[in-house]
Image: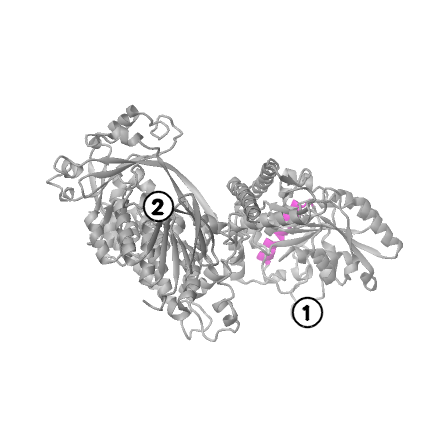
Amino acid sequence: MPGDSRSLRAVVVGGGPVGCLVAIELRKRSFEVDVYERGPDIRSYPPARGHSFNLTLTKRGMDSLDEDLLELLYGRGVPLPQRIVHAADGTLSYQPYGSGPDHHLLSIPRGSLHELLLQRAENAGARFHFHHEFVGADPSIPRATFAVRGVSVTEAYAELLVGCDGANSMVRHVLSRSGARMQVSQDHFGDGFVEVRLPADEDGGHTLLRAHRDPAEPRSEQHGLHIWSRGHFMLMTQPNTDGTYTAGLWMPLTHPDPEQPSWETITSPEAVNELFAEHFADVVEFLPSLASDVLAVSPAPLKTIRCLPYHHQRTVLLGDSAHTLVPFFGQGINCSFEDVRSLMSLYDASVGRHGPVGAIDVTLPEFTRTRKPAGDAIADLSLAMSSELKRSAASPGFQARTALEKLIHRRHPDLYVPLYHAVAFTHTPYHEVTARHARQSALLDELCARLDPVRDAELIIDAYAAAVTRRDHAAEVSVVPAGQGLSLSPDQEKELLDRVAERLAAYQGDLAKGGLPASFGDLDRVGAGPLGPQGASAPYEGTELSDLLDQVFDQALPSGMLHAHAGFLSHVPSGGLFQGAVGEFVARSLNRFAGAWAAAPGFVQIETAVVRWFCTAMGYGEGSFGYLTTGGSIANFMALRCALEPIAEDERHRSAVYVSAEGHFSVQKAARLAGLRADRVRSVPVDAECRMDLAALRAMVERDLRDGVTPACVVATAGTTNTGAVDDIEGIAALCGEWGVWLHVDACFGGFFRLTARGRELLAGTGQADSVAVDAHKSLFLPHGNSALLVRRKETLKAAFAIPGAAYIPELSDDEDRPDFMNYGPEVTREVRGLTAWLPLRLHGLRAFEEALDRTLDLADDVAARLAALDGVTVVPRGRPHLPTVTFRLGPAGGGTAADGLNERTCELINSRGNVYLSTSSLPGHGTVLRVCVMHHRTDAAVLDRLMTDLEWARETLERDHVERSIAS
């Protein structure tokens, strides 16, 4: 093998089939390998029956095994070349998996596979330690700690720690609390199963094979995976070499209709016998101990577990520890064996360049990058297969479609690969299989909708082949062929869009189903390669688009915070509404100049409509106007520029701006941009609810007036970042009216909550302000870069920014209904901005946004109540009504350094799991607090459930660590 690894040690946690296989492969590479298993040696204590349905190996998994080992496995297993589907009326259908010699499943009892691999690993030199339960680790060393038979503790050190300890992996649990920033999601399927045994007939033969032998059907002479599909439940059986069958009965644990079979209702021998007599009558005679088998153990629940990353430092998860699947595709063991093959291939590819230890450091992040998409894809496929097995397998329509797909594959193997074939009998990564199948199915669905899959099979096949050939020919066109220059043909533009859309769709899918963390902690891929120093110089030659997309989606994307994640509860999240991004893309693609009406009147009209919608939402009426900006900071700057305009130019530097101590720091930045010194920004104290103290404001303004300082602007805050507090806008407006001072409302957080009844109550008075800054990328969920400054009187905006036009732009308008935006803001050249908001607002209507905003308020109320109900947790009083921000604290109020540290560490631990991302802040009288801001259209009760679970886990972790430190000291 490449490299010399003789000095390297590996600790494998879990002595099951996957742990044994990785031990074998590591020994081939001269690692010293110790395998630690919590249970006994199965060679002395055979595994108990009840929850051990046979494993089904396919080519994907078997190609990870040596040929001589495969030969032994075939001696202990039974090849299954087909499904045999038992319809409710007693008829059988035979569904071959394929026509090639390796197109079969190998059904083998788990114990037989495990025993062979264990013996092989031991023969290879791996050392096994049974009755050693993993209890902890330091992944950076790495060091693993084990409890030995519950009476002593031992530690093991190695260069590589491998977690193969299954669905309830303790290695995964330890990684998730050891700085891995691991996101773990667990979804219970709702089904349970029990094992049922069919004994052999009197002469040791297979009863089902004998009973269903039909001279007119040659396939009846072959074994198969027997399936009784019955809607929401099913029976499956697989033959063993000794003439017996291992069967599994799969049913929901509960069912809303008590008349339907479920494990909640099938609890007596009579119920079991009735179930089988009605639904599985043709197998009853072969089950002499049916009721006792079914009721011997409680049904085993099924679940899917996903995590990210699969590694941390020099520790890696393989198999069920990284991705637990429901068993309906039979790919659990195959995917796990492929994990081992993939890990070893990556190591072999890097050991020559990086050396044995360096290869480990390079291999593990790459393993996560390449295997995570595959693990998620097969998890989804396994869930989808449950429906096929239970409901579709016996359907004539399904069988006709399946037969058609196989026929297309035989005729055109390069153009169509059936899904099951690609999953089981190829090495194409699962996620690529899924993407290809989606493309294939879309075309085939369209043809089958017009033509009959049975009667018109030949027409469909020919039409499919012709369409794919045309598409593939178009795809062969390089996006940027050498020497072409900068112009792309329409076909090349479409190809570019298709490739980008495919990657974006995959990202959006991962985002929607929770396949990404709220924050990435692994920055290994950032600052390396083209994104690091090597990429500092512009390339002289072009780069393949696929490589560039890999850099964007595989290197740049998985780093930092994911603001568009439903669990991102920090700062003021931006939902990144996809529909808005489409509007942005259209605007950029059309590349129209929106600084002057004459240049793009249609698009200026769209932007003007958006501005008027925003003005109406803020309570402004006739005569109001606004300017779309890239952020609230620019909007606040523009407001100060408007406020200073009436003041004599040589007096402006003596002006003062007033903002509460809880106001946003962008006000100080805006003042600097407007030419004011830092000491001209007055920080007004706040009251107990973190709102501007009006008495303090009055005192400050009156003192400045006495001192000859001109009060230029008061900035009221409609949604402080810390707590979501909203200043008394109506009260401040009354004071500004007394003094003739410009009132600006920084409503970047809360502005669009005025679409809701509660928000209009909370933000009463915005219509009286001279100007309002809003962020549509906050409370309208749009992508970043969508804000606005709105003014009550249009002429004040134009007075602050209009400059006489240049001679070469004679088309500028004098018509107030045809605005030239260059005269209403600081920019001359500007893109069309309105489409980003116009498209989703027109597409969904205001009601959808109102309902989404109301939902965030309800969710914040809910999480505040749930936090307040916890012992040792103090929720900072919020006042009513309020924006959807909740701050809370662990430990005594007011705290101190130790309590502040407790809250900081709690936040770090919660964020380390990746399900949600919180921030901390500091509040007077409370010290360090944790902060939850619910501002995402995808955030729901399930996200808050994960927050509460992660909070409890963090508290338990800190308590356990405290106890351990106390014992140690």
Magenta stretch, main secondary structure class? helix
Q: Quadrant of residue 416?
A: bottom left
Residue 949 visible from this viewpoint = yes
587 and 729: which is toward the camera = 729
Task: Give me the residue at 78% from left, 62% from top.
Answer: 677
Q: Quadrant of residue 436?
A: bottom left
- Mark 1: secondary structure: loop
Asked whether residue 609 is drawn in magenta, I would say: yes
Q: Amino acid at mark 2?
A: Ser
Q: Mark 2, residues whose alpha carbon is within 10 Å: few (<14), some, or many (≥20)?
A: many
**Picture coordinates of residue 870 (x, y %)?**
59, 37
Q: Amino acid at mark 1?
A: Ala
**Picture coordinates of residue 256 (x, y %)?**
40, 29
Q: Earlier in the sequence, mark 2 or mark 1?
A: 2
Above or below for 245 versus 37: above
Name the residue tied to disc 2.
Answer: 382
Name the residue tied to disc 1.
Answer: 806
> Which residues are drawn in magenta?
601-619
Residue at the far right in the pictured view: 706
Q: Nearer the viewer, mark 2 or mark 1?
A: 2
